[in-house]
Amino acid sequence: MMDHPVTEQKSLRVETDGEVGLIALDNQPVNALGQAVRQGLLDAVAELNANDAVKVIAIYGEGKMLSGGADIREFGKTPQPPGLPDVLNGIEGSAKPVVAVIHGVAFGGGLELALSAHARVGLPGARVGLPEVTLGLLPGAGGTQRLPRLIPLDSAIEIITSGRHVPVAEAVELGLVDWLAEGTPREAAIKAARDVLSGALPTRRTGEISIKPDEAVLNAAREKLAKKRPALAAPLKCVDAIAASGLPIAEGLKAERRLFLELMDSPDRQGLIHAFQAERMVKHIPESAAQPRPVESAGVIGGGTMGVGIATALLQAGIPVTLIEMDPNHAKTAHERIVKNLDGGVKRGKMSAETRDQRVAMLTAETGLEHLSQVDVVIEAVFEDMKVKTGIFRDLDRICKPGAVLGTNTSYLDVNEIAAATSRPQDVIGLHFFSPAHIMRLLEVVVADKTAPDVVATAFAMAGKMKKVAVRSGVCDGFIGNRILAHYRMVADYMLLDGASFEQIDRALEDFGFAMGPFAVGDLAGLDIGWATRKRKAPTRPAEERYVRIADRICEQGWFGRKTGRGYYLYDDPKSRTPNPDAVAIVDAERAAEGISSRTFSDDEIVARYMTAMISEAARVVEEGIAHRPVDVDAVFLFGYGFPRHLGGPLNYADRIGAAALVERIEGYAKEDPHYWQVPKLLRELAQSGRSFADLNKE
Ligand code: 3H9
């Protein structure tokens, strides 16, 4: 049968195939339901209903998926009609039956589109979901009304409040998708439409199904969600919207719309969408045009925690690894630890046992750098000592094949100096992983003065394979993350010395949204790490800098936190933390020695000082070009430092406060300590011009 194109526009295509009217979404890459697609859908359904030859309509997507949902770039702007709920009501109300084909993904508005059709088929490998809650929203185009009409209430609540991606097989089992189809999306669309015509595929309007949501189930969900920290508005409002699904569909949709618009106006929504976009924006780097070098094998030097984690992450990405240790015993232990990590992946359902076996076969642990002569990438992960590292790089220069990428997993050392130890500084790059490296998503890619663009592109391509969020950083002590951390961490110590307790500081910041406060984090990471850094920096510490000795005093007792059973807190019971009375006594003694009479801090003041310190150093990092854009700093903190996602990162949060108010705060604090509290030039410029960090992201 010949195709008869009816309408063609960039975002959507309409054609007929005998009695079948086909609507193909074509707004790639994700077929987002922007204004042109919405208008196109509405017009197409009307046009095909008016075409007497057409008896049934099938909707499918071109490219990789049916649809990733509403176009989130439209959020926060003046809405352009027609609204998605009206378009989907138009589809559900179509006199001719409509069937939707789900391939790739149908997320958010994309799934709501499928729910408004009268039947749904899915192609193998597809996933469906309503991830709006992860963006601080609720499904606002009928998802909260139609999903509970099709599947059990508890499943609908779980899917909507978690935003989880549901595999198509599970969706079929739940009754969300009618059955699994085969072929290309277009073939599946024609076949499904014919099945509708023959009666094999039954159709019904989801909105006409009537249900009575069980109050007890709704209340149990509310109770559970209210306990989550931080308690965000969106999940609870999702349940409120689902509760309205017992009403006639038109009324339920009205309730859903009202709740959706309330969330659309919330700062959490802005922060969460910024976090979503940050993950993608950091990929846009000046070196994007360079062709990455092939990475088919890697070497990892060092079988400590970092080396083992990095090797695991490479293997998880399917990259064969040669790990180098000092002697056969260490090599054997590292091998065992990596295998244990991979086993963990199988236990957590992240990897099949078969894949695990394949990955183990891709691992060799050896002694001697000579084994790295043919690898495409080397990642050195030995301890932080410039002499040791430059020695290794001198050897690598001699041993590695031309064109091999030479990476160093340093967390603060000068990558230029390491590169200068070789005759090929263009191939040297910093690859700063975060521990545990096979779990933490952040990778700081540290670009030294002579690093070649294609080496940077290779690091980003490799990070992509490893499902890491790579962020480009320039060279400075601590790069983006640890440099900012070193600065704001000091303010927590200043508040401690001046009268706040470490317990109050931790709690205030945890209530604000951090998973753990700075003192609890210190105990977890090991207080000896910060101690070593302070000793290293001591010779260059400016005389005017206020220095708090509390942490040093605690370390001098041999108390390094959790691993020694005590630090700021006691860990007799590994699950709980109680303040260590001896640490409290050290705090008191230090206050007395400094002649400080303690003052009280409100929780709000603690948060304000801590966040202002973080924002100040973050602004300097952007001002100096260490981070290219504010969003790069945001991504580092979101994916490496447990920054509360709904606040969108330190500089996104800074825009909530505003540059002028921040300058005013800093000038106020500077009256106590003019050395620590200085207004960054960039922040002052923004305050004067009335611009924001978000404006800089657009430049
Ligand atoms: C919603 O639907 C609300 C409704 O309930 C109610 C409305 C009234 N819009 O991730 P990728 C961009 S809320 C605009 O790298 P992948 C993305 O930024 C929405 N743009 O590809 C990137 O841009 P760039 C609910 C979007 O193949 C490019 O597309 N939906 C959208 O790895 C490629 O993205 C969601 O929350 C969008 N909705 O993964 C789903 N989505 O190239 C969010 C992506 O310039 N999206 N972009 O950097 C996803 O989960 C993934 O993007 C998806 C594709 C799985 C679809």
Image (spheres, rainbow, N blue to C red):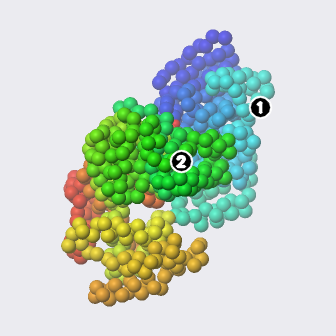
Q: Which mark is residue 365?
A: 2
In the figure, residue 354 lies in which quadrant? top right
Give the side of residue 461 with respect to residue 312, left or right.
Answer: left
In the figure, residue 118 lies in which quadrant? top right
Query: Which residue is tagged 1?
Result: 202
Amino acid type shown at disc 1? Pro
The quadrant of the picture occupied by the N terminus is top right
Q: Residue at x 53, y 60 (%)?
A: 232
- Disc with the residue nearer the chain's start (2 vs 1): 1
Whole-percent x, y for residue 608 in the image: 35, 69
Whole-percent x, y for residue 220 in the image: 69, 63
User: Who is closer to the viewer here, 576 or 135?
Assistant: 576
Q: Residue at x 34, y 51 (%)?
A: 391
Q: Which mark is residue 656?
A: none
Mark 2 and mark 1 in contact? Answer it, CB < 8 Å. Answer: no
User: Who is closer to the viewer here, 677 or 221?
Assistant: 677
10 Å neighbourhood of mark 1: few (<14), some, or many (≥20)? some
User: Who is closer to the viewer here, 684 or 306?
Assistant: 306
Amino acid type shown at disc 2? Ala
The quadrant of the picture occupied by the C terminus is top left
Any part of residue 281 in sight? no
10 Å neighbourhood of mark 2: few (<14), some, or many (≥20)? many
Whole-percent x, y for residue 508 in the image: 44, 72
Whole-percent x, y for residue 20 in the image: 67, 20
Q: Does residue 370 lie above or below 240 as drawn? A: above
Tell me the distance, in whole angstroms, between the alpha carbons under discs 2 and 1.
59 Å
Give the side of residue 92 with respect to residue 78, left or right.
Answer: right
Q: Residue at x 74, y 34 (%)?
A: 179
